[in-house]
Image (cartoon, rainbow, N blue to C red):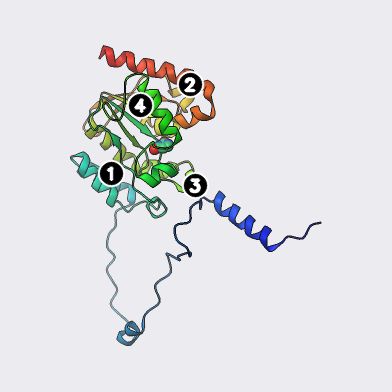
Amino acid sequence: MQAVTERDALIAALSWQLSMGADEAMLDAPVARTAAPPPGPEAEAKRPPTTPSAPIPLRKVPPAGQLSASLAAGASTLEELRAAMAGFEGSALRETATNFVFSDGVPGAPVMIIGEAPGAEEDRQGKPFVGASGQLLDRMFASIGLSRAENLYITNILPFRPPGNRTPTDAEIALFLPFVLRHVQLAAPRFLVLAGGVSAKGVLQAREGITRLRGRWHEVTVLDGTVFKVLPTWHPAYLLRNPIAKRDAWADLLLLRRNMKDD
Ligand code: URA
């Protein structure tokens, strides 16, 4: 049997970190974020003698889900929503993401696309769908005359990249859903396109997967009672891996174009 060298052990440790989602080095040296900073000499000198102190009243912090719902409801413009989400501290995803990713395209456009979450390139640039799947998405919608420069508005279920591009958890989706629905209400598109299973199941609160949901119209009702027409379709990243499914995606795009003309 071959001996395990120190190099083998280091490679194994790196590969474990990669599989846990630590796929980017942000600093030269690791930072223990949870450790308290060591007290400097001045702080030591000023420290009062230890006497029992009065109990500190606990500040009532609302659970993160209630907080996202009330922040979302309190935003009355897209700019207010962007600011509320950027300041929202109820998700650990913001600690690992490089950038907050809100939207791209034309607010108020007739078609709004909701994807899953930023990937590595989106996280770097702070814009949704700018990597390989975004380029395919642009080509797909250009084929029916839609572009983010003119008549398309794009966002995601999560505004932060999950570490290692893992799939968002149900809890993360539920946490950000009030923001997403408020985003739809404020952007007020005529048609909503849900790209992929995470977006479709999240927005439609459906038990079925994208295979069953895609290719037909659904409706979603937002907080003020407005009803939006919703078309789930394959995620472009899925189409890159399964080019055969592009014909379904093309049928979905034609369905969208037909309804835009009729409307
Ligand atoms: N995939 C998504 O769902 N959204 C992006 O912004 C990029 C990739």
N-term mark: 4 or 2: 4
Q: Secondary structure at mark 3?
A: helix
Mark 3 sits on what residue?
A: 164
Q: Could you tell me the amino acid type at mark 3?
A: Gly
Residue toward you, 245 or 194: 245
Q: Pinpoint residue 240: horizontal percent, then vertical percent.
A: 50, 29
Q: Is residue 201 visible?
A: no
Within-10-Å neighbours for mark 2: few <14, some 14–19, many 20+:
some
- The nearer-to-camera label among 1 and 4 is 4
Q: Could you tell me the amino acid type at mark 1?
A: Ala
Mark 2 sits on what residue?
A: 246
Distance from Cα at disc 1 to Cα at disc 3: 27 Å
N-term mark: 1 or 3: 1
Q: Secondary structure at mark 4?
A: strand
Distance from Cα at disc 3 to Cα at disc 2: 26 Å
Query: Vertically, is 116 above or below 27?
Result: above
Q: Pinpoint residue 242: horizontal percent, then vertical percent.
A: 54, 26
